[in-house]
Image (spheres, rainbow, N blue to C red):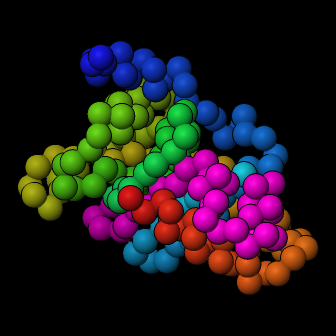
Amino acid sequence: MRIRLGELRKLVLEAAVQASGLPSDVGLIFESNKWSMQMVLVKLDVVDQIAKSGDFKNVSKAIIGGITATKEDVWRVGSVSAEHGYGPLLYRLAMQFATAQGSSLSSHQSGITSDEATAVWERFVHEPDVRMLKHPDKMGTRSRSFQHEGNDYERLAKRYNDYHRDFEGDIERLEQFKFHAFNAIRV
């Protein structure tokens, strides 16, 4: 069965999860430097079980989704994967980070974007709290990037950092979990 782009866009709009609706046991593992960032949305109770047991082959059970981006002319998404409905949230969190850095977020310049990702980007064109910018890219064509004010990514990262600080177990195992989680989201 084939789904037309309009139908896919409708499904994305209906299914999107909002940061305000996340349960308190969801946190964000977040790392960034001047040129790259990575975010992994996780279920903290499952992280706890895996980190304490050292059973890292089950890391994916704790991961809700993840996104990576690199800084070029703007922040460009490298990869994103998520459970159903969480993709738009991950884009929003990355957009908030890019905006806080005085930049914006866009798709990768390769031009290879899945139908699902295209539907998410199109959704942002119509959202009043997201600002779309048009600018020339390296290829000399006009491209779009997006900004979104907010601190949801910081709030969710604080949840994970508080969990990390209070972790009652081998902290090295928790760091190993983080390493495996970041590797799992790179597709």
**Residue 179 lies within the magenta run:** no
- Residue 125 image point, x, y percent: 37, 31
Name above or below for residue 118 compared with residue 174.
Answer: above
Quick check: 47 above or below 9?
A: below
Residue drawn at the location 42% of the way across and 18% of the way down: 10
Of residues 137 and 110, the one drawn nearer to the viewer in this rendering: 110
Which quadrant would the N terminus be assigned to in this image?
Answer: top left
Relative to 53, 153 lies left or right: left
Check the image and name the residue furthest to the left.
Answer: 140
Whole-percent x, y for residue 16 in the image: 55, 30
Image quadrant in which the C terminus is located: bottom left
Q: Would you say 6 lies left or right of 97 here?
A: left
Of 20 and 136, the residue lying toward us: 20
Q: Position of residue 5 (x, y in %)?
A: 28, 22
Q: Residue at x 82, y 46 (%)?
A: 24
Image quadrant where residue 155 sits: bottom right
- Residue 79 visible in this rendered orientation of the protein: yes
Residue 52 painted magenta = yes
* Picture residue at 42% right of the left edge, 40% below the top: 131
| Relative to 157, residue 31 above or below | below
Q: Is residue 40 left or right of residue 123?
A: right
- Please give the count of numbered marks on the rendered protein: 0
The quarter of the picture where residue 161 lies is bottom right
Q: Which region shows up in magenta?
A: 45-74
Above or below residue 161? Residue 67 is above
Q: Is residue 42 visible?
A: no
Q: Residue at x 45, y 20 (%)?
A: 11
